């Protein structure tokens, strides 16, 4: 389609105007959730119908904390949450991810922008368990080669599956340790669909689950990575 200036709308799942045709189809068929990926399916966007029938595009800074919160809560409820684990995020991605991870006893690693940096930190976790000193800068190639020469990549991924519980970036990229060292929009869509299905079995909606998470951990600016201090917001009585 075209935007208001007549330019082609890029197939970006983080852009609401890229989902207008999907909205029309969903309206015709009574569908409440729209999943979208970019052409190579490494990023995922999710749009949900709100109680007033409008459509809300769930940004990465809302979707990723909810995905992590739900997964860790379920793991804890079923006694499958280990005592030691990690979450990796780019530094521009919501700090709510840090609060979710710490609530469940996990360590958070912040990286620069780019999933290649997230993947590098994942490898660094495994290197530490193998006694390989993981240096910075020009030394990175040396220790990465040493790690992968001494260990099969499948073995490295298997180890990460029990240590790394989420990799997140603000530009709608996500992955799990043990799955891949690259972002995967299809995996993200499947996990979010699982959350939606579970919410509906409980008679809830995805927006309802978001509210539960916010009530538990606090509200954050959806377009930023900092919490909202509700004590400074005026109430009905002006205080």
Image (tube, helix red, strand yellow):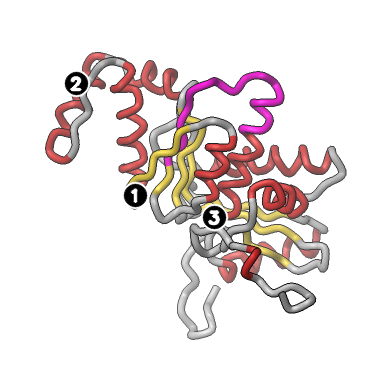
Residue under label 3: 61
- Specify the quadrant that holds the N terminus: bottom right
- Specify the quadrant that holds the C terminus: bottom right
Q: CA distance from mark 2 to mark 3?
A: 35 Å
| Image quadrant where residue 232 sits | bottom right
233 to 67, vertically: above or below? below
Closer to the chain start, of discs 1 and 3, is: 3
Q: Does the segment drawn in magenta span residue 64?
A: no
In the rendering, which numbered label is found on residue 146? Answer: 2
Closer to the chain start, of discs 2 and 3, is: 3
At a point 61% along the width and 65% down the height, the residue shown is 19
Q: Is residue 205 left or right of residue 95?
A: right
Look at the image and give the residue range highlighted in magenta.
72-88
Residue under label 1: 114
Q: Secondary structure at mark 1?
A: loop
227 to 116, vertically: above or below? below
Q: Is residue 38 left or right of residue 74?
A: left
| Image quadrant where residue 146 sits | top left
Q: Residue furthest right?
A: 203
Compare residues 34 and 175 and report the one nearer the observer.
Answer: 175
């Amino acid at each position: 389609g075209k935007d208001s200036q007549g330019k082609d709308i890029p197939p970006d799942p983080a852009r609401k105007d890229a989902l207008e045709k999907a909205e029309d189809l969903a309206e015709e068929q009574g569908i409440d959730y729209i999943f979208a990926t970019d052409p190579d399916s490494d990023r995922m966007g999710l749009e949900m119908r709100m109680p007033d029938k409008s459509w809300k595009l769930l940004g990465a800074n809302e979707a990723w904390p909810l995905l992590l919160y739900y997964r860790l809560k379920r793991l804890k409820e079923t006694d499958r949450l280990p005592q030691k684990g990690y979450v990796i995020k780019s530094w521009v991605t919501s700090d709510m991810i840090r609060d979710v991870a710490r609530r469940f006893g996990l360590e958070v690693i912040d990286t620069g922008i780019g999933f290649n940096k997230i993947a590098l930190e994942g490898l660094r976790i495994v290197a530490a368990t193998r006694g390989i000193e993981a240096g910075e800068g020009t030394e990175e190639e040396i220790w990465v080669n040493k790690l992968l020469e001494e260990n099969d990549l499948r073995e490295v991924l298997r180890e990460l599956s029990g240590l790394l519980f989420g990799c997140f970036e603000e530009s709608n990229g996500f992955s799990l340790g043990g799955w891949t060292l690259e972002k995967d929009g299809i995996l993200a869509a499947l996990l979010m669909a699982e959350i939606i299905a579970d919410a509906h079995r409980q008679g809830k909606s995805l927006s309802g689950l978001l509210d539960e998470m916010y009530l538990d951990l606090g509200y954050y600016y959806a377009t930023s990575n900092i919490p909202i201090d509700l004590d400074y917001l005026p109430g009905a009585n002006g205080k």
